[in-house]
Amino acid sequence: MSQTVSAARKQAMTPNALGAILLALAFFVFFALSGVNASTTLKETTVSTSMPLPQLFFSLSSASILLIPVALVCMLCTLIATVGRQRNVAMMFSLVAFLAFGLFLIFFSREQMNSALYTPLSEALKNAGVKFKKRDVKGIETSFSPGAFMALAACGLTALLCMPKWRKEQEWRRVGHDLLPYAYIAPHLFFFIIFFITPAVYGVYAAFTKWDLFNEPVFIGLDNFKTMLFDSQNTYYRQLRNGLWNTVKFVLYSVPFCIAVPLTLALALHAKAKGSKFFQAIYYFPSLLSITTVTLSWRYMFSPDYGVMNRFFGSTENWFTPPYSWIVIVVVTVWWCTGSTMVIYQSALASIPQDHYEAASVDGAGAWQKFLHITLPGMRYPLMYTFVTSVVAQFNIYGQPLILTGFANREANAVLLMYIQENAVKKQVAGMSAAMALVLGVCIMIVSFFQLKLMRSNAPD
């Protein structure tokens, strides 16, 4: 009976845990309802405006705004940890959220000129009949609504409710034991939030906006997708189809060689011939180089004027025009990617028991039969893994065609990422570029989904 009562007490959530959950939820509510107030004075005319914090979060107008996703993710982790009864972990995440959100309030309020706030203030000055230039605005005074400080207080109170009783030595040890794993992953987690999650969220949002990288994005809904998917008279309609089709062609051309060539080299090195370690280092070396270095080196080799290829073969062909251009791009890619995939295959070959080959030899099996019935089944999962990663990597092709051919030959080798970069950086049509990138990402996700489904169907019961 006593064991049942103690188990029920462990399962029951403490008042502090319930309070922490409510405060964590309150943080998100206060954040959604809070805002920033801004005002400026020019030529004895004072104008003011206000902007909700969620809208400011998507304005991409300040480096300090990057602290907001850190606070949001940490409070979400706090909520999950509290529900999972990980009290010390919840305390840590809530403290980080408190620190990140507090630093955001401090740094943002000290900014003299913020583009997201300058745009509505300039409109207000124009409506008031004030003629001015941007350099005439010396600064913008900002202040936050009470909801922002209530959100900050919710972070701090959540951390207080999750704190253990520090007077007991056993609690100190438990805190150290619970938080030590997070100390190891904290740097990676921080940069993962800043440089992966945050750009991904901003990228998806930007796909639904009209944005030139300098001014505040304007939400336009599905207009970007309607234009590039259905408006056949528009340039972006042609760019999407040409770029996506060239990307798919490159994947079909390169992926088989990115699997077959490393597999052949791994099988050859597995024979342990004299000098195999030297050749293994030689084959692996290209994967250590940057794609720019690799592509420029091959560009010199295939140059129609002074390239080694034309000199050696006595040819006068221009390797950077179709159909030879695809051959050059595939050769450069395979040469660059072979090393890392080869190492994976070498590890897989080493894990296959030698007894299987010896038994097959006794039964009279030849080299080809051993390869089909022993080697390939033994390497099934590494092969599927490299197949999935190779497809995803080659869908992101960019550097090789950009350096080797660019947009020449009537854009015969222009892949989708080249159009995305061209539109976003040079033409400053970042919203349309983000929409193209989102379409490419969806295509990669669909292909990866079917690949993973194939891997699971081949898995043993």
Image (cartoon, grey):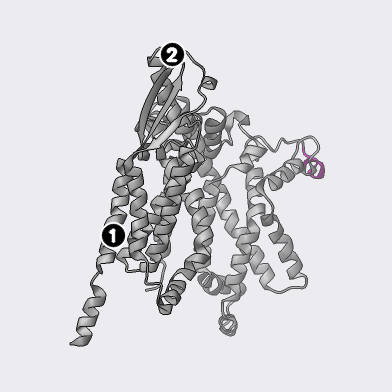
Q: Secondary structure at mark 1?
A: helix
Segment tinted magenta in the rendering: 310-315
Residue 267 picture quarter: bottom right
Q: Residue flagged by tag 2: what amino acid is it?
A: Val
- Alpha carbons under labels 1 and 2: distance apart: 50 Å
Q: Quadrant of residue 269?
A: bottom right
Q: Quadrant of the C terminus?
A: bottom left
Residue at the spot of label 2: 130
Q: Is residue 233 visible?
A: no
On the image, numbered disc 1 is attached to which residue?
21
Q: Residue at x 66, y 72 (%)?
A: 270
Three-letter amino acid code of the residue under disc 1: Ile
- In the figure, is residue 68 to the left or right of 338? left
The spot of residue 309 in percent (x, y) is 77, 44
Nearest to the observer: residue 176 or residue 282:
176
Q: Is residue 267 above or below residue 294?
A: below
Mark 1, other Cα within 10 Å: few <14 / some 14–19 / many ≥20: many
Using the rendered image of the protein, determine whether residue 79 is visible from the camera's viewpoint.
yes
Question: Which of the two residues, 336 or 266, is positioned nearer the viewer here?
Answer: 336
Mark 2: give few (<14), some (14-19) or many (20+) Cα within 10 Å. some
Q: Nearer the viewer, residue 460 or 222?
A: 222
Q: Is 344 rendered above or below residue 441?
A: below
Q: Residue at x 61, y 75 (%)?
A: 350
Name the residue at 51% across, 32% down.
Answer: 112
**Mark carried by residue 105:** none
- Magenta stretch: includes residue 353: no
Mark 1 and 2 residues: CB-CB less than 8 Å, in contact? Answer: no
